[in-house]
Image: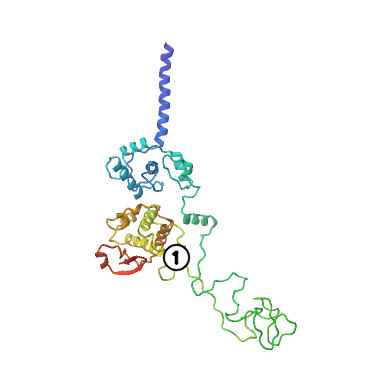
Amino acid sequence: MNKTVRKSPLMIVLCLIIFSTFSNVSNVEAFSDQIIQRGATGDDVVELQSRLQYIGFYNGTIDGVYGWSTYWAVRKYQDEFGLEVDGLVGPQMKAMLEKSTDFDYEWVHRQLEEGRKFTYYGRTPKDIQSGPKGSRIPPLEKARRQGQKTGEVPQAPRTPAPGTETPETPGTPGTPGTPAPGTETPGTPGTPAPGTETPGTPGTPAPGTETPGTPGTPAPGTETPGTPGEPETPTEPVPKPEPVPDEADPGDAPDIQEAINVPGGFSENDIRIMAQAVYGEARGEPYVGQVAVAAVILNRINSPTFPNTASGVIFEPRAFTAVADGQIYLEPNETARRAVIDAINGQDPSGHALYYFNPDTATSGWIWTRPQIKKIGKHIFCK
């Protein structure tokens, strides 16, 4: 009896230690005590996005940034379950999410660390929700990182300007010294001049004439055409093709090759929300029109009469149709993202416009009073 009594306190202590250990483990995978709100970043937001996506309320990227997509997912959840709809994630909502969802902390954070593109929907095998390593890195950013490793920034070949010839590589026909267009290259088929012998027949060439050789190769002992001292009548020198300028020619077409990385001053969340706006507003427009819409957003950010953030400009009341009809929440494609990056890098096909509208669908009489700059696609851009 005494032995049993003596062992009881020891068993109680062991149980408390085991319980405390499991409690600490679960706390690592649970929310912190802080209220989560728009603008927050970190593990709490990763868990929030994962749990909301687990039950289908959040369809965006799990990136640990509480942006607009997360904000509207939170509000939808709050409205669905009778909570105060304010976008703030407090103890009550956290407790409800913990009871109704599972969160695999280790798996989710491994996907983030390995740069995988992944989702976290419930009742779906995880192995089919995870992409290869590095797949979450945007293609342009991936190219930039690879360029840093090799010491080169990858650039796609540029198309020569109309009317110019593509410069040839050294050692190939077409290098300086090539006869001007319209003259025959020694050795090419053609009608021989009177008094000269047909190329390839025996005989001695007439004085002052050149012995035809292989195409593009001057005969031994003769000078290369175009050099000083040539016995033939001098011809006009062939102008060298001018190199294509690095900057875009005047006009609407954006120089998309310059947009290799995400410029400083804008977060990934800013890039995404602007891409969503471009996609919702102009995905049916030509590419230059999509860049112009992105440029209008940036022009407003830089204007003292508008909010000075991307989200502030886009979600300003009655500012964009895509916000009013919900198309702002569609998943943008890579073209919309490139259009935003081109605009950030300085491309502005809109002509520094602050407004644009579709004349076929516009219902505001006020917009017609704005000074018009140009029309791109279906949109008229205004000051």
* Rendered residue at 40%/29% (across/down): 20
- From what the image shows, is residue 265 above or below residue 226? above
Quickly name the residue at label 1.
255
As drawn, the residue found furthest toward the right would be: 202
Could you tell me if residue 308 is visible in this image?
A: no
Q: Quadrant of residue 332?
A: bottom left
At label 1, the amino acid type is: Asp
The location of residue 12, given as percent across then percent down, is 40, 21
Q: Secondary structure at mark 1?
A: loop
The quarter of the picture where the C terminus appears is bottom left
Q: Is residue 185 visible?
A: yes
Answer with left or right where residue 308 lies relative to residue 132.
Answer: left
- In the figure, is residue 97 to the left or right of 204? left
Q: In terms of depth relative to the viewer, which is nearer, 331 or 370?
A: 331
Q: Position of residue 375 (x, y in %)?
A: 35, 68
Q: Image height check: is 183 above or below 255?
A: below
Q: Is residue 258 left or right of residue 72?
A: right
Residue 92 figure quarter: top left
Residue 300 is drawn in which quadrant?
bottom left
Q: Whole-percent x and y of residue 261?
A: 45, 57
